[in-house]
Amino acid sequence: MDIQLDPARDDLPLMANTSHILVKHYVLDLDVDFESQVIEGTIVLFLEDGNRFKKQNSSIEEACQSESNKACKFGMPEPCHISVTNARTFSSEMDYNDFAICSKGEKDTPDKDGNHDNQEHASGISSSKYCCDTGNRGSEDFVLVLDCCDLSVLKVEEVDVAAVPGMEKFTRSPKLTVVSEELRNQIVRELVTLPADCWREQLDYYACCSQAPGCGELLFDTDSWSLQIRKTGAQTATDFPHAIRIWYKTKPEGRSVTWTSDQSDRPCVYTVGSPINNRALFPCQEPPVAMSTWQATVRAAASYVVLMSGENFAKPTQLWEGCSSWYYYVTMPMPASTFTIAVGCWTEMKLETCSSNDLATERPLSPSEADFRHVGVCSHMEYPCRFQNASAAAQEIIPYRVFAPVCLKGACQETLLRLIPPCLSAAHSVLGTHPFSRLDVLIVPANFPSLGMASPHIMFLSQSILTGRSHLCGTRLCHEIAHAWFGLAIGARDWTEEWLSEGFATHLEDVFWAAAQQLDPREAREQQELRACLRWRRLQDEMRCSPEEMQVLRPSKDKTGHTSNSGASVIKQGLNPEKIFMQVHYLKGYFLLRFLAKRFGDETYFSFLRKFVHTFHGQLILSQDFLQMLLENIPEEKRLELSVENIYQDWLESSGIPKPLQRERRAEAECGLARQVRAEVTKWIQVNRRPRKRKRRVKEEVFEKLLPDQLVLLLEHLLEQKTLSPRTLQSLQRTYHLHDQDAEVRHRWCELIVKHKFTKAYNSVERFLQEDQRLVPAGHTQKADSHKQPPTLEPASRPGSGVELLWDFEFFCTDD
C-alpha cells in the first residue's frame, strides 16, 4: 500500500483503493447461526472503475435528473423469476441450464456447491508482491483492496452477469453469442448507471446477477486490515471484473457485531458501532467517499426477527419449517459504515389505544409513487430522492415501528411509543423533508455501549431511556432523529470532523424537544439555557481530563479530507480507547452552533439551515462547506468580524475552551432555572449542617419541585460538598423519589451514594450497574463492549465528575 501504518498508534486505517475503483452496490446473502455465533454466506460487489466515476463527480454540480415519466433508456426484460428472498447464490460449478431452471426456494447444500469448505482456494496471493501498487502503473496486475478484518474469506470469483436472461438489453448486441470480460464489464457499467426512476428494475437485475454462475475464481490474500483481490492479466481497474462474489463467514470474536442475550435472556446479535465499523461483518470499502446502495437477504430461525438498514418494512418469508428469510434494500447511496443489522427475538410494540401512532401502520412512500414532482434542484448523485417527491416532502410523521423484548412492553407503551410522533413532527417543522421513508426503533440489550445509535431507517435506543419521566427518552429520541439529516443524509467527508454530525445533533435535540413539547418561546429558552449550563460544566470537565490533542475538532487542519493516491487514509485516534468517553465533538460543536444561532438570530439561522439541508443532502461535506455557505447567506451587518479562518482558529483547530465561548459565559447571567437550583442547593447545605439532635423545633425546609435537568444540576452541585450525612441523603432520596427518576439523575445519585458510603442505598447502585450499563465506565460492566462508530454513537455522559467513584463500588461494599 502507499500509506505507512504504525501499529503502536491509535489511528484507524482505511485501506480501500477508492481512487481507482468504487463499489456501487452490494448484494448480501447471509445465514445467521446462533449456535456457532457466525454469520456466513456471500456478498456480490458491483464495481465502477475510476475513469467513469471521476467524470460523474466532475459534473455533479449540474444536478441532472430525470423526469417522472421518463422511461429507462434500456427496455426492461421480464422480471427474473428467481426468488430474491429465498434463493441461494449460485456457484461457479453450476452451468447455464442449472441457473435458468432453478426452482423457487431451492437450497443447495455445501457439498453440492462446494463453496463453504473449499479451503484450497484460500492460498491467495502474496501481499508483499502485489499490494505495493494497487493502481495501473507498470506491468503488475491491478489489485482491488477492500477493508476487511476478523473475517474468514473462503473463495472469490467473477460473476457471469452475461448469463442472466435479458442482459443483451445492456449491450449493443441483439444476442450474447461471444461473451468477453469487456462485455461483462459493459453490462455492469450500464446497470449501475440506470436512471433513478428505474430503481425497482435495477434492484431486480442486481438480484438476478448476484445469483448468476461464476466464471472463474480470483486470487486473493488477506492481512490484518484488508482483503486484496486480483485477476491474472487484468492490469487496470477498467480491465478488472466489475461483478465479483465473495464467500466468507464472520468470527465469533469479530468486533463489528456483538453476540449477547436480550433482557428476556434470549440470544441476539447486532452491529455494535465498533471503531472498525462493518469490516468484520462483510468486506467493503470503508472510506465515506465510497457511497453505495445495497440489498440483503438474511436467513435465521423462524423465531427471530431481522431488522436492518432498509427502505422497506420487511416481513418474514418462510423457506422451510423453522427457517425464515428477510429482505431489505436501500436506493440512496450511503457509506458502508452506516449499514446496520440486528437479529433477535424482538416483539413489535404498539399502543393499545388509538392515537397518532396509527400512522405507523401506513406503508412508507416508495421513491416512484404518486406525486413525484420537482420541488427543487438536487446536487447529489442521482437516486430516488424524497426531496423531489412532493408527497414525501409534506410527510410530517414517517411510518415507524418499535421493537423490544416482550418484558419491556409496558415501558415502551408508557413513554417511547407516545413520544415518537411529536418528535418526528417537530423535526419536520424545523428542517423540512425527512430524508428517509420509514423508521424502525429497537430497544437493544443492556450492554449496548450507548444511549442511542442512528442508522439509515433504523435506530437503536438503550433501555435506560425508558425509566423515569419522558424527558431523557424525548431528548435522546430527538438527538437520534436529528442524525437522519446530520450524520446520515449529510455526512462528514473526513471522519475526524465528527462535530459535523454530533455537534448538530446535540444542538438540534434541544430545538426539536422544545417543539415536541409545544413550549412557549420563553419556557423553551429557559430550558435550553439550563441545558447549556449543564453542557458548560461537562465541557470544563472534558478539557481538564482529556489530552490536548484529542480536544481539537479539525485535527488534520489543511489536510482534512486528503487521502493517498490510492484513496487509502487513516483516521486519527480512531482506535484510541479513551475516545469512547470523549464528548469534545458534541460539546464544542454544540457551543459553536449555539454561538452562531445567537449571533445571527434563530429565525435567520434556521432559515439558512433548511437551505443548507436542501443543498447538501445526499452528499459528504467538510467544515468549510457549511461555514462558507453560512457566511455567504448572512447579511454583512450580522457577520461583523466572523470569517471561516477565525472560526477555524477559535473553535475548530485549537485545544481547550474557545475564547469566544469563555467571553460569552462570563457575560451571561445565570438562567432562572439554574438560579432556582442554586437556591435549593443552599437549603440542602443548611439541612446538612443541622445537628442530629436539635434542642428546639426548627422550621422544616420546603423544597421546590424540579425538572429532570434541574435535578441533575442539583446533584452535581451536592457532589462538590465534602460530606453529606446519611440523614441528608435519606431526605434527599425521599424528597425527589430518586429511585424513580431517569438514568441521568440516578447516575448522579449513585455517585453520591458511593462517595458518602450510604449503605442503605447500595441496592440502587447495584440496580444501576445491572440495568444502565451504558452510563457506567468501561471495565465496570459485565461485558464492556464500548465502541464507537463514526458518526452516530453517543459517548459517556459526563467524565471527570465523580463517575470514577463507581469503579470502586465493590470495595466500598466490602469495607462496610
Image (cartoon, grey):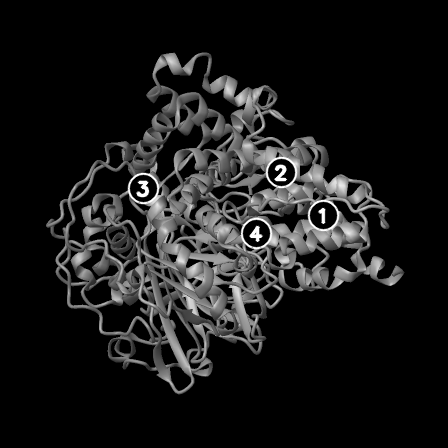
Instruction: Identify the amino acid type marked 3.
Output: Ser
Q: Tell me, for residue 677, which label it has, or none.
A: 2
Mark 1 = which residue?
Answer: 803
Compute the Cα span from label 3 to label 4: 35 Å
Residue shown at 34%/36% (left/top)? Answer: 613
Tell me if 191 is positioned left or right of 633 in this view.
left
Q: Earlier in the sequence, mark 2 or mark 4?
A: 4
Mark 3, residues whose alpha carbon is within 10 Å: few (<14), some, or many (≥20)?
some
Mark 1, residues whose alpha carbon is within 10 Å: few (<14), some, or many (≥20)?
many
Tell me if 224 is positioned left or right of 491 in this view.
right
Q: Nearer the viewer, residue 382 or 734?
A: 734
Compute the Cα span from label 1 to label 3: 37 Å
Mark 3 = which residue?
Answer: 429
Q: Earlier in the sequence, mark 2 or mark 3?
A: 3
Quarter of the image that includes the C terminus: bottom right
Quarter of the image that includes the N terminus: top right
Compute the Cα span from label 2 to label 3: 32 Å
Q: Nearer the viewer, residue 695 or 640?
A: 695
Compute the Cα span from label 4 to label 1: 27 Å
Question: Helix or strand or loop: what does disc 4 sit on?
Answer: loop
Task: State which mark lies toward you, 3 or 4.
Answer: 3
Question: Helix or strand or loop: what does disc 2 sit on?
Answer: helix
Compute the Cα span from label 2 to label 1: 21 Å
Instruction: Identify the amino acid type marked 1.
Output: Val
Dots 2 and 3: beta carbons under 8 Å? no
Question: Helix or strand or loop: what does disc 1 sit on?
Answer: helix
Instruction: Identify the amino acid type marked 4.
Output: Ile
Q: Earlier in the sequence, mark 4 or mark 1?
A: 4
Q: Position of residue 295 (x, y in %)?
A: 35, 61
Please tell me whether residue 199 is drawn above or below residue 502 in the rendered image: below
User: In which quarter of the view is residue 487 placed?
Assistant: top left
